[in-house]
Structure formats: C-alpha cells, structure tokens
Image (tube, grey):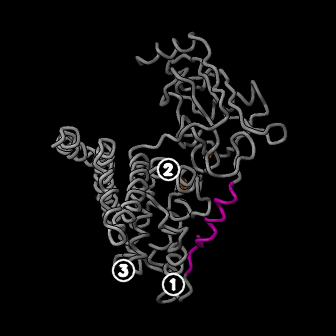
C-alpha cells in the first residue's frame, strides 16, 4: 500500500477548510456528459447562425444592393475567425451526431460510446488542422 | 474492535476529512458546507464515516440508510461529485489526500442534510405500471412458460433497487423534473420485454411522450451511477427502438 504514506501525510498536513459557497459541486460526469454539453453548445450556435444566415440571404429578393452591403461586411478578419468557429462547431456536431445515431440504433454503439467520443474528437482535430491554416491564410493573407 | 477486518489485516486508521453539505429547513435559508475529521480504516465505507460523525460528533446529521449492504436503495448520495451508495463506497477507493465531499442527490427537493423528497421519483415509477399485467389464462391452465432466451433479454433491468442514483444524475432531469427519468424507464423495460406481460403496448404509449424516452440525450451519467451495474442507457435505447417498431423484440417462445 504505497498510498498509505500519502494518507497519513494528509492527516498531518492540517485541516482543509470547507468551501464557502453553499452551491453543490459540479456533477462529475464523464465523456458522455461532456459530449452532450458540447453537442448542445455547438447546436445552439449553429441554430443562431442559420437564423441570421437565412435572414441575410433573403435580403437578395428584397434589395440586391443591401444584400451586397451585408455580405461585404462578412469579408472582415473578425468574420473570418467567426467562420472558423462555425466550421469547428459544425464539424464537432456532425461527428458526434454520427456517434449518437450509433448509440441510438446499435448495441455496439452503446458499448463503445466512450471510444467513439475520442475517435470523433481525433477526426475533428485532423479536419481542423487541414482547414484552419488554409482558411486563415485566405482571411489574413488577402488572397 | 477485534472483529474489524482492517485491524486483523494489520492496517492502521488514519484521519479523513469529510465535507458535508448540511441543510436544516427550520433555521437556514441555504445549505452550508461543514467539515468533519474522522478516524477511519481503508476498509470502512462512506456510510461508516457518516455513522461515526452522527454517533460521536454531531447527532443532528440526517441521512437515510436501512440495509447498509447495497440492497434497500436508501442511501444514494453525491460523493465527490458522483452519485454513489454510501454503503457501497469504500474509503480506500477514494482519494483521501483530498477531503471527501458528500451532498444530497440533485434534482429532487432537499428536505434536510442528505435527505431529499423521493415522491416525484416514485410518482414516475408508479406511472409506468410496474407490475405484471397478464389477464389471459395460461396455456393448460398452469404456468406461463418462458424460455431462457426470453428471460435473458430483461434480466439486467430486474436488478433495480430504486435508489434514484440514475435519475438524479441525469442533466435532463435536473432541468426538467417532469421527465420520467432513467429509473422509471428501466422498470418499464423490465415488463415491456417480459414475454408473459400483455401490456407492453400501454407502457410504450406512456413512454412515447414529450417527457418520455425521447428526452434521453444519452449522457450515460445514469449508467455510470447505477450501483447495480445496470446498462441503463442501453435499456432506454431498447425502449426507444421498441416504440419505433411498435412492439418489443422478444425471442420466440419454448
Ligand atoms: S437503475 Fe440503478 S441507479 Fe437507477 S434506481 Fe435502479 S438501481 Fe438505482
Ligand atoms: S443502506 Fe441500503 S442500499 Fe445502502
């Protein structure tokens, strides 16, 4: 029992005071819970983007000049970074979405959900490594 | 303490700090964290620590327990941020270089210290009709024969002890108390997939609801919390698929 020493060490190291906040601790869920949190955040972000995007695209039927003006403002570096975030959100949502489908319809998916989460993250990192440099060159390189 | 297995094994006691979220509805507006130092053996359980505090330091500490052996389902609580039975959580399995945080399960009304009102939980349980419904006379008027394969498909969900560790670990249930919750679905699964039961359709209809199985977002918190090792998320997925198919997939009889 190697941790025995650490334990008696903790006993002599003095009392650790109780936290001040009355709130409960954060529930320590694992991959499943965090994948759901990410899915929610990215899903909500994508929803609001689509809402704005449908509105700005519908402008073209009303007033082509106004449409051009609005689309023109998208060609700024800040919007370029926003686009990067959008692609990141969609990528993650799509890959985890495939994982959720596998969980809902196959026993295999339920069993390997944790592994699938890390596979989704790995694929997402690879996709972003491919996309981000090119996109940023495009945004900031003025090409 | 001659009968203490730790003493027999030559293990020595050490001091562990427990930080417990206390609440007294008569004198407090909000719960507060209080810390206690307890002498414990590695083979002690969190329940033993709570007993020591209640018996030796502060008799007002309130919690539920009954069997103390993982069978009655009374003492589900949040231990270091995860739902566990206090009577099944060994001190040696926790990191005691840090204090142990103990608080009531989440999402059910807090009554006092570690005790919550379980009524909303049991109301959902009653709603799925957790009893065998079999009106037709058995063949030959004797028994309802079931094959091994037929028994197998709902074996996992017969193990539930209604401790609420799963339901109160569910983020959906925290924000939407109307959701049936994993425990009710587990117990519905137990009868839906029982070849002797005749009311699968009724239960599937009950759970094919806005607050039914479709609320499940597969966070797997329930599966990881269940002290009986029930594959809760899998059972919910099977009920979802049974609703889509219109009936449960039960193997052919004997
Ligand atoms: S399914 Fe498991 S965690 Fe949920 S109430 Fe039953 S025994 Fe407790
Ligand atoms: S006291 Fe009965 S399950 Fe823990």
The residue that mark 2 highlights is B226
Please, is residue B5 above or below residue A39 in the view? Answer: above
First in residue order: circle 1 vs circle 3? 1
Asked whether disc 1 touches disc 3, contact meaning CB atoms under 8 Å apart, the reply is: no
First in residue order: circle 1 vs circle 2? 1
Residue B92 placed where, x, y %?
Answer: 49, 27
State which chain disc 1 sits on. Answer: B
State which chain disc 2 sits on. Answer: B
Residue at left 53%, top 89%? Answer: B137
First in residue order: circle 2 vs circle 3? 2
Q: Which mark is residue B253?
A: 3
Marks 1/2: CA–CA distance: 37 Å
Q: Which residues are magenta?
A: B118-133
State which chain disc 3 sits on. Answer: B
- Residue B131 visible somewhere in the drawing: yes
Please, is residue B34 above or below residue A38 in the view? Answer: above
Tell me the SS state at disc 2: loop
Query: Quadrant location of the N terminus of chain B?
Result: top right
Camera-side residue of B214 and A43: A43
Q: Residues within 10 Å of mark 2 (few under 14, many from 20)?
A: many
Q: Which mark is residue B142?
A: 1
Tell me the SS state at disc 3: loop
Ligand 1 within 8 Å of disc 1? The answer is: no
Residue A92 placed where, x, y %?
Answer: 31, 50
Residue B121 placed where, x, y %?
Answer: 64, 59
């Amino acid at each position: 029992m190697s941790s025995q020493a650490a334990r008696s060490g903790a006993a002599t190291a003095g009392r650790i005071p109780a936290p001040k906040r009355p709130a409960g601790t954060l529930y320590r869920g694992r991959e499943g819970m965090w994948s759901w949190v990410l899915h929610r955040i990215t899903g909500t972000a994508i929803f609001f983007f689509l809402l704005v995007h449908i509105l700005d695209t519908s402008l073209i039927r009303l007033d082509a000049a106004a449409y051009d003006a609005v689309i023109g403002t998208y060609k700024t570096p800040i919007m370029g970074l926003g686009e990067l975030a959008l692609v990141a959100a969609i990528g993650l949502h799509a890959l985890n979405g495939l994982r959720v489908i596998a969980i809902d319809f196959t026993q295999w998916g339920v069993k390997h959900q944790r592994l699938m989460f890390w596979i989704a993250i790995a694929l997402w990192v690879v996709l972003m490594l491919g996309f981000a440099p090119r996109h940023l060159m495009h945004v900031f390189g003025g090409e | 303490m001659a009968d203490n297995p730790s003493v027999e094994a030559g293990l020595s006691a050490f001091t562990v700090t427990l930080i417990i979220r206390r609440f007294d509805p008569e004198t407090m507006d909000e719960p507060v964290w209080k810390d206690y130092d307890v002498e414990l053996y590695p083979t002690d359980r969190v329940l033993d620590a709570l007993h020591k505090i209640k018996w030796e330091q502060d008799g007002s500490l309130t919690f539920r327990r009954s069997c103390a052996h993982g069978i009655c389902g009374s003492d589900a609580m949040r231990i270091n941020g995860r739902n566990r039975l206090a009577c099944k959580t060994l001190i040696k399995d926790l990191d005691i270089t840090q204090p142990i945080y103990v608080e009531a399960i989440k999402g059910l009304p807090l009554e006092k210290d570690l005790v919550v009102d379980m009524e909303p939980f049991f109301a959902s349980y009653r709603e799925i009709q957790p009893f065998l419904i079999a009106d037709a006379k058995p063949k030959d008027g004797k028994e309802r024969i079931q094959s091994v394969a037929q028994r197998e498909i709902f074996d996992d969900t017969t193990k539930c002890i209604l401790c609420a560790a799963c339901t109160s670990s569910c983020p959906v249930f925290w924000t939407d108390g109307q959701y049936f919750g994993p425990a009710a679905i587990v117990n519905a699964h137990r009868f839906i997939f029982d070849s002797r039961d005749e009311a699968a359709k009724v239960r599937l209809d009950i759970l094919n609801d806005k607050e039914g199985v479709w609320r499940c977002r597969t966070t797997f918190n329930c599966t990881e919390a269940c002290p009986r090792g029930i594959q809760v998320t899998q059972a919910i997925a099977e009920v979802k698929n049974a609703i889509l198919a219109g009936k449960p997939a039960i193997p052919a009889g004997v």
